[in-house]
């Protein structure tokens, strides 16, 4: 699969991944501190670094990247089948729980614990990280070299982080005036995710499930 072709698959997954009310809520919480730009930036950096590192570890744990250089393996489609089922299951249950939010009694924020909080949000935000597993599987299915696969994963993480970077950027540009705006965006995202997440998770789950089933029946993937 060409590097541009894979984005037709990754973009819908990325859109689902970005609709993450948990991460945004924590960033808004950090932006409400006495150092909004520095602390929200540290939290986003912590999250992005952990997300990218987790992606590398997950890719290597599925199988060595070198084993995926020539063509997709049956194991990729087995993983895709499982992920499709999991995404559909999450779509059904995601309206009931959108994840943990910041605790008002949390300790005073500093650069170190914001960076750490950002990394930990990866785990608090499950099931919102599940689409990321699907993105990794699609990258490993493609005919990329090890370097290209890592760069593709890096590009995915960079694009993923861009919408969330609006929190420190708006805090820097607008100062205290950004806080009520960010709170309104946070409230909207929280409400929107209650119907967007089931729709996006279910759609991607069905597509992945169909691709895996078609591969196992015909020997050829849908994409």
Image (cartoon, grey):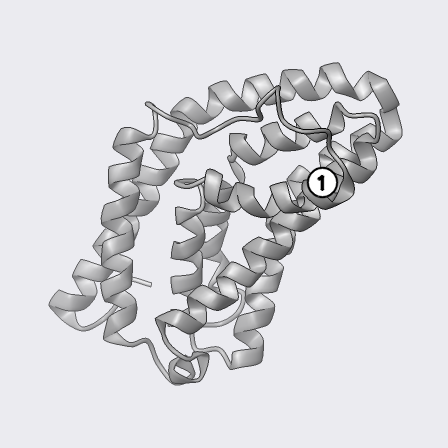
Of residue 126 and residue 216, the one placed in the foreground of this image is 126
- The image position of residue 199, as x and y in percent, is 35, 32
Of residue 119 and residue 194, the one placed in the foreground of this image is 119
Q: Quadrant of residue 90?
A: top left
Q: Quadrant of residue 60?
A: bottom left
Query: Is residue 94 left or right of 186 when viewed as pictured?
Result: left
Compared with residue 24, is residue 50 higher up or lower down, i.e. above or below? below
Q: Is residue 16 visible?
A: no
Q: Is residue 97 visible?
A: yes
- The image position of residue 4, as x and y in percent, is 54, 65
Compared with residue 205, is residue 200 higher up or lower down, i.e. above or below? above
Name the residue located 51 percent from the left edge and 46 percent from the top edge: 122
Query: Is residue 80 left or right of 19 when viewed as pictured?
Result: left
Residue ID for mark 1 = 165
- The image position of residue 84, as x and y in percent, is 27, 50
Give the quadrant of the N terminus.
Answer: bottom left
Of residue 52 and residue 137, the one placed in the foreground of this image is 52
SS label for mark 1: loop
**Total marks drawn?**
1
Q: Quadrant of residue 135?
A: bottom left
Query: Is residue 13 left or right of 83 when viewed as pictured?
Result: right
Name the residue located 37 percent from the left edge and 26 percent from the top edge: 97
Query: Is residue 211 left or right of 130 when viewed as pictured?
Result: left
- The image position of residue 210, as x and y in percent, is 22, 53
Name the residue located 43 percent from the left edge and 78 percent from the top edge: 143
Of residue 61 and residue 186, the one placed in the foreground of this image is 61
Q: Within 10 angstroms of label 1, few (less than 14), some, or many (20 or more) residues?
A: some
Give the quadrant of the C terminus.
Answer: bottom left
């Amino acid at each position: 699969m060409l590097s541009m072709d894979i984005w037709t698959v990754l973009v819908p997954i990325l859109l689902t991944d970005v609709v993450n009310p948990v991460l945004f809520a924590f960033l808004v919480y950090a932006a409400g501190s006495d150092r909004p730009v520095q602390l929200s930036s540290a939290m986003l950096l912590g999250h992005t670094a952990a997300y990218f590192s987790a992606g590398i570890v997950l890719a290597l744990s599925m199988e060595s990247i070198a084993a995926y250089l020539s063509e997709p393996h049956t194991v990729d489609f087995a993983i895709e089948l499982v992920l499709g089922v999991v995404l559909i299951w999450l779509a059904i249950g995601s309206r009931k729980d959108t994840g943990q939010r910041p605790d008002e009694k949390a300790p005073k924020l500093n650069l170190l614990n914001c960076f750490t909080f950002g990394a930990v949000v990866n785990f608090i935000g499950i099931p919102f990280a599940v689409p990321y597993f699907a993105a990794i599987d699609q990258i490993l299915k493609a005919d990329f070299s090890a370097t290209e696969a890592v760069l593709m994963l890096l590009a995915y993480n960079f694009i993923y982080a861009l919408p969330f970077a609006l929190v420190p950027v708006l805090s820097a540009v607008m100062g205290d005036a950004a806080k009520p705006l960010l709170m309104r965006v946070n409230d909207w995202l929280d409400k929107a995710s209650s119907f967007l997440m089931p729709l996006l998770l279910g759609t991607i789950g069905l597509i992945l499930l169909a691709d895996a089933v078609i591969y196992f029946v015909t020997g050829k993937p849908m994409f």
